[in-house]
Structure formats: C-alpha cells, structure tokens
Image (cartoon, grey):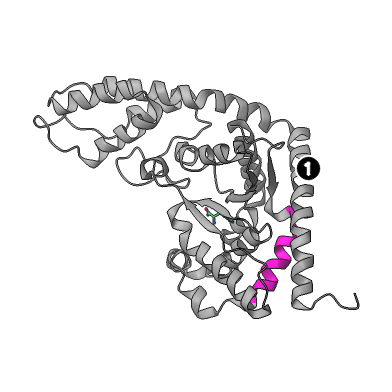
Amino acid sequence: MKTVLSGIRPTGNLHLGNYYGALINFLKMQEDKDNRCFFFIADLHAMTTHPDPKMMQENVRNILATYLACGLDPEKATIYIQSQIVEIVELELLFGPFVSIAELSKVVTFKEKAKQQPKNVNVGLFRYPVLMAADILAFNADYVPVGKDQEQHLEFTQHIASRFNNRFGVNYFKEPTPFIVKDQALVKIPGLDGSGKMGKSEGNCIYLVDDPQTIEKKVKGALTDNGPEGANTPKPEYIENLFTILKVVSTPEVVAHYDHLWNAGEQKWYGNLKKQLAEDIIKVTSPIRERINDIKNDNAYLRRVTQAGAAKARESAGKTLRDVREIMGLNYFA
Ligand code: TRP
C-alpha cells in the first residue's frame, strides 16, 4: 500500500491547467487499489497572504465542490481541510527545530514573495515549507503529486524526515518522493494571452466554472496573427499555445488537421480553430461546471464530507503525533 497526498491552496477558482496538471492525476491515483489517498485544501498555507475571511470561505467551498465535481470520491480518498486537522499544526511546531533560518531564507518561493511584498515578509511565509512537511509527514506519504515549483519545498520534507530519524536513531519517517508530472504540456496549460502558464491569479485562464459564452469569448480573444508565413515554418509561441490546449481537449485527428493547415502554410483558418477549440473545451468543462454549481450550494453535503474526511485524517495524523511525542520523549508519566 502506498500513501499518496496532495493539496491545493484555496486562492481562487480552479482552471483548466489545474484540471490537467493536478486533478486528473489525483483521479488516477484514487482509482488504484494499492493507493491510500489524501487530498486536502491547504487553507493554512493560504493565510500567509492575508486573505479576506469571506473570500476564504468562498474559495474553500469552490475548491471542495470542484474536487467532488471532478470525481474525487470521499469513499475512496480522504478529503479534508487542512486547518481542521490540529495534529498537523502541532507537528509543524515540533519540526521547527529541524531546519535552520539560513536554509529557509534561501527558498526560492520565499525570496520571490519577499520581493513581491517587501512590507509583508511574515513568519508564515518563512515557515511555509515546514508546514508542508507537517502536511506530508503526518501521514507518512510515499508520493506527493505536485508541480515543478514545489520541488524545493519537498526537499525540506525529505530533510526533516531524515534529520528526525537520525536525531533519534529511528526509521520512523519515510522520505517522500515528489511525483512531478512528466508531460509538461499537461502541467503547463498555457494562458490565452499568448504566453506563460495558466495561473489562478493571472487573468489569462479558463476556469472550470466558466460558462460556454465566457469560454467562447476568451478563446476568440486569444492572440493570433495573419497565419504562417510559408510552408513548414516554426509556430510562434502564442500559436503553439493554442495547439497545446487543443492537444489535451480535442482528438488527434483534429490536431492533425490544423497541424496540416499550418504546415501547408495556409491562412485564414484561425477562426475555425478557435471555434473548435472553444467547443472542445466546453465539452470537457460543462459537466464539471454543472456539478460544481450543484454541489457548491449543498451545505449539508459539504459539511458531511469534510467532517468525515477530518475524522479519518485526524485518526491517522493522531497516531503519527503520538508516536512522534513518544520518540521525542514528550510522553511524560506514561
Ligand atoms: N504548496 C502547495 C502549492 O502551492 C500546496 C500544498 C500545501 C501541498 N501543502 C502540501 C502540496 C502538501 C502537496 C503536499 O501548490
């Protein structure tokens, strides 16, 4: 049995890039009988950027509804909200002494955030990798599916696991393996403004909750040009982007058709390409959107799912915490 664990920070609606980069993998892993899966909403990590309480509630509700709408199944995986598992918070505290200020200061994501918000370089941001280690080690996860940007954080989890084991002469924590999705095209669904990755906070992406008209409008507005300047010319990045999305949502025949038009150096088919692209995106997202909207308003169901998930997660994390306390000598007068 392998333990798989991953979380998403609730900072906005999930988009097509999250779906193909993260959620599809979660689904595959959940269906494997040899996996014990934990999927959670990393709300405590989101606190580092001071979200508004109302937005926080809304975002957590949306992500939870999206998880369920995409097919994550509370019967097959443990689905929970991070802040409802107090054991994680205590582990984070206990792990603090296993990492140095110097190391944490060198974390790329920390340095970037510090640059972005120089007036708000808070301790929460600083301890971000330690909290992630607590998330993961609370369940002694074997595999952690994440994006490439999380690799360095996972190294901290590995360090903390091995330092803890060495310090106490035990073989208690496993060093988790990051499961970085190999196919970059699937992880980096490009934005529609012609460049870069689809980011939740950038205005260039297609959300799973976007209605058909919105999707059509966004795709129509994607950057194009007059067409290839000759036969077999390389595609500029913004055209390549459209093909990248087409490859994940359409059939190979459709992709081959437009590839052929490009390579033949033909012009005036971008309109058709965009129509097809919008149609195929809508085909993928429509059933998900409808389910999100149903589930989102079912407060009793969401409460039931998160209560059951928290109970399961706390049982497992509670056992880890008891073991850790004992190993560290914090089990007085036992
Ligand atoms: N930091 C991750 C991100 O921003 C989210 C996250 C928090 C996470 N804790 C985790 C991912 C534990 C995997 C495992 O994407």
Residue for point 66% across, 40% down? 61
Dominant secondary-structure state across the stretch colored magenta: helix
Residue for point 69% across, 60% down? 138
Determine which quarter of the picture holds residue 74.
Answer: top right
Is 239 situated above or below 117? Answer: above
Q: Quadrant of the C terminus?
A: bottom right
Most foreground residue, 173 or 325: 173
Most foreground residue, 324 or 296: 324
Q: Which residue has dot 1 on it? A: 308
Where's ligand 1: which quadrant? Answer: bottom right
The residue segment tinted magenta is: 84-96
Three-letter amino acid code of the residue under disc 1: Ala
The image shows residue 294 at horizontal and vertical percentages of: 66, 26
Residue for point 68% across, 73% down? 170
Is 223 situated above or below 325? Answer: above
Q: Tell which residue pokes out farthest to the right in this image.
A: 333
